[in-house]
């Protein structure tokens, strides 16, 4: 691909990075475990949509602003941390819904279990979970330029293409996480019995991710 160096290495590195568990993977898996494969897939698409925000921002220089301005980074950092804390607290405090999916032998054959949370809400929460994380923006700014040829005539276009490739491959990894989690909760009775505890564990982890983001230092600090 013109203007791009080592595309195969870029794809491999991107797949490995997407396989690494983090807030995005946790969000997808927790919804697939709780509400079935449809909620997991919608969560995956929400995360991917949020990632497009960072690709566009990095391409037009917003990520460079976050790198250069401690104030801009801190502002977005606190907004993102607050949102992660909100999601985590919501998981911890949520009551057992009356319309939770039926994971009994009869209900397990259903291809579309009822979701306690609307799919629109699942999508939007996934979108904001990713879009409000400034570290994702800085990741694109640091990672993608390594694969752009110094002599590339259109570096911004090359950056956008690499971002699209990364996000496209990441979507399939996220879909894999969702389907694997939905399959696991159908296959193993212990997971079905422990869904409420899984929600609580996910809530604690989200709060941990939020605190970690809140305590992070601006680039170059």
Image (cartoon, rainbow, N blue to C red):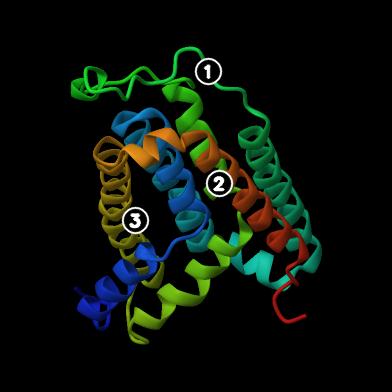
Q: Mark 2 sits on what residue?
A: 202
* 43 horizontally vs 98: left or right: left
Residue 31 in percent (x, y) is at 43, 36
Which callout, 2 or 1, points at the residue further toward the start of the chain? 1
For the point 64% across and 57% down, which residue is it? 209
Q: Which residue is mark 3?
A: 167
Question: How far apart are the two marked residues, 3 and 1, measured between alpha carbons?
Answer: 33 Å
Percent coordinates x, y for residue 151 in the rendering: 33, 86
Residue contact at pointers 3 and 2, CB within 8 angstroms: no
Depth check: give the residue in front, 3 or 82.
Answer: 82
Q: Position of residue 42 (x, y in %)?
A: 37, 33
Q: Quadrant of residue 91?
A: top right
Q: CA distance from mark 3 to mark 2?
A: 24 Å
Give the number of marks.
Answer: 3
| Other-residue count near label 3 (Cα within 10 Å), few / some / many at <14 / 14–19 / ≥20 | many
Where disc 1 sits, the SS reads loop
Q: Is residue 99 above or below residue 64?
A: above
Q: Secondary structure at mark 2?
A: helix
The residue mark sitting in front, 3 or 2, is 2
Q: Find disc 1 in the rendering and name its residue.
A: 97
Residue at 78% across, 60% down: 74
Q: In front here: 37 or 152? A: 37
Camera-nearest residue between 159 and 143? 143
Task: List the single residue furthest toward the right.
Answer: 71
Q: Earlier in the sequence, mark 3 or mark 2?
A: 3
The percent position of residue 150, horizontal first and vertical second, equals 37, 87
Up the image or down, 199 lies above or below 135; here it is above
User: How many other residues sit within 10 Å of disc 1, few (<14), some (14-19) or many (≥20)?
Assistant: few
């Amino acid at each position: 691909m013109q203007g791009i160096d080592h595309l195969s290495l870029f794809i491999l590195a991107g797949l490995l990075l997407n396989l690494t568990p983090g807030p995005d993977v946790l969000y997808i898996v927790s919804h697939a475990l709780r509400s079935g494969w449809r909620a997991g897939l919608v969560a995956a698409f929400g995360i991917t949509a949020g990632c497009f925000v960072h690709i566009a921002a990095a391409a037009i220089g917003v990520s460079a602003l976050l790198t250069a301005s401690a104030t801009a980074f801190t502002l977005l950092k606190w907004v993102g941390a607050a949102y992660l804390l909100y999601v985590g607290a919501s998981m911890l405090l949520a009551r057992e819904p009356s319309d939770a999916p039926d994971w009994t032998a009869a209900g397990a054959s259903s291809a579309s279990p009822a979701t306690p949370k609307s799919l629109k809400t699942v999508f939007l929460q996934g979108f904001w979970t990713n879009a409000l994380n400034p570290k994702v923006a800085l990741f694109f700014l640091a990672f993608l330029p390594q694969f752009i040829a110094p002599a590339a005539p259109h570096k911004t276009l090359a950056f956008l293409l690499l971002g699209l490739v990364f996000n496209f491959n990441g979507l399939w990894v996220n879909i894999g996480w969702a389907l694997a989690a939905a399959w696991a909760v159908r296959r193993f009775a212990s997971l079905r019995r422990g869904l409420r505890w899984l929600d609580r564990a996910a809530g604690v982890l989200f709060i941990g991710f939020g605190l970690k983001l809140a305590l992070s230092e601006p680039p170059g600090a």
